[in-house]
Amino acid sequence: MAELKKCPFCGGEAKLNYVGTCIPLYFISCEECGCKQESSIHKEAVINAWNNRATEAEIRATAKRELAEQIEKRIKEEVALLEQEREEAREYDDEQVIFAVNNQLRAFAYSLRVVAEQLKGE
Ligand SMILES: [Zn+2]
């Protein structure tokens, strides 16, 4: 039998449990906090699921990174639109629009730096 990893929530010792009368059911529980996983008739599947379970910290880090990536994508789309708008304003020498667009682009550039910090600061 493969060795069981420690509990992903509290680091406690894990234990393989066996229940069932006519159909055998396996599940793993933590001896410390009592958390347990869904039971299965497949012992190896239960062990693999327990050992490959993401920790709370991993789940949070992934969610944070995905959110930052979505924000980065949206900002880049907005920046592309603004750059297009600025090109058009240049054709008509529209100083006011160019000035306004440049201000917005500076604000977005700042936002992108903040998002980039979030993405690498894990
Ligand atoms: Zn635990």
Image: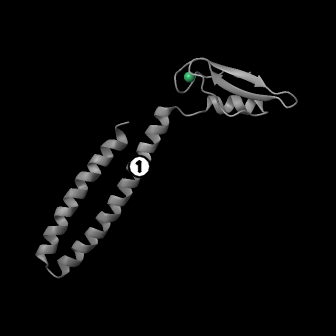
Q: Is residue 107 left or right of residue 71?
A: left
Looking at the rendered structure, the kind of residue marked 1 is Leu
Within 10 Å of disc 1 (Cα), the crowding (few <14, some 14-19, many 20+) is: some
Residue 102 lies, with reference to residue 68, above or below; the image says: below
Quarter of the rendered structure image containing ligand 1: top right
Residue 90 appearing in the image: yes
Give x and y (percent) for residue 81: 30, 69
- Residue found at the very far right of the displayed protein: 22
Q: Which residue occupies 16% across, 68% down? A: 100
Residue extending farthest bottom: 92
Whole-percent x, y for residue 5 in the image: 61, 23
Please tell me in which quadrant of the rendered image residue 97 appears.
bottom left
Q: Is residue 21 left or right of residue 34?
A: right
Instruction: Say which element carries label 1.
Output: helix
Q: Quadrant of residue 88?
A: bottom left
Q: Which residue is mark 1?
A: 67
Q: Residue at x 65, y 31 (%)?
A: 37
Tell me where residue 27 appears, x and y as whole percent: 71, 28
Q: Is residue 62 above or below residue 91?
A: above
Q: Residue at x 46, y 41 (%)?
A: 62
Given the current orientation, which residue lies at the most extreme left position?
95
Res. 3 in view: no
Quarter of the image where the C terminus is located:
top left
Q: Is mark 1 within 8 Å of ligand 1?
A: no
- 103 vs 10, nearest the viewer: 10
